[in-house]
Image (cartoon, rainbow, N blue to C red):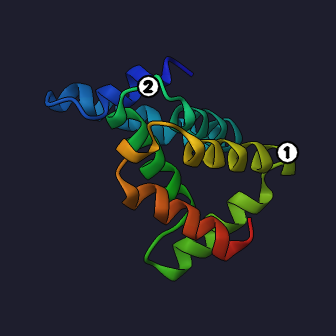
């Protein structure tokens, strides 16, 4: 996968063509390599030196990869998560916990991070 930071920045571009290409690349990455998707995006979320908007989007995408309003979709996402290697799931959890300990965590919007932790806690993932 290309540079995750650039991909996340481009997914927020005001240029619709650049934004669409990045969104498509993110969706393709998640579909083709879900384990690496979770690892890379959780790592991006945890890195203090990354721009806040990048970390926020990484957290939101992780949350959306674990939770949905539609119950059928939610069940499918839970099964996909549970199908991942337990070591990958553990590493993702560690990255998310590292984010909470981050000195710049207070600058991250609470909603995506809180929702992500809530989803993981409810599912005992």
- Furthest residue to the right? 86
Is residue 28 shown left or right of residue 97? left
Please name the residue shown 71% across and 42% down the image: 35
* Viewer-proximal residue among 99 and 61: 99
Residue 97 x/y as whole percent:
65, 49
Q: Which residue is mark 1?
A: 87
Is residue 58 shown left or right of residue 81? left
* Viewer-proximal residue among 65 and 95: 95
Whichever of labels 2 and 1 marks the residue nearer the N terminus, that label is 2
Please name the residue shown 42% across and 51% down the image: 60
Q: Between label 2 and label 1, give the one nearer the viewer.
A: 2
Residue 9 x/y as whole percent:
32, 27
Callout 1: helix, strand or loop?
Answer: helix
As drawn, 44 above or below 120? above
Q: Which residue is mark 2?
A: 50
Please name the residue shown 70% across and 50% down the image: 93
């Amino acid at each position: 996968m290309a540079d995750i930071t650039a991909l996340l920045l481009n997914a927020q571009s005001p240029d619709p063509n650049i934004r669409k290409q990045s969104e498509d690349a993110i969706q393709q990455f998640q579909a083709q390599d879900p384990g690496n998707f979770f690892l890379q995006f959780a790592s991006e979320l945890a890195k203090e030196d990354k721009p806040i908007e990048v970390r926020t989007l990484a957290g939101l995408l992780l949350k959306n990869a674990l939770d949905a309003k539609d119950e059928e979709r939610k069940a499918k996402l839970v099964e996909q998560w549970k199908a991942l290697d337990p070591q990958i799931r553990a590493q993702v959890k560690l990255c998310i916990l590292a984010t909470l300990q981050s000195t710049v965590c207070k600058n991250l919007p609470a909603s995506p991070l809180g929702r992500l932790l809530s989803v993981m806690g409810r599912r005992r993932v």
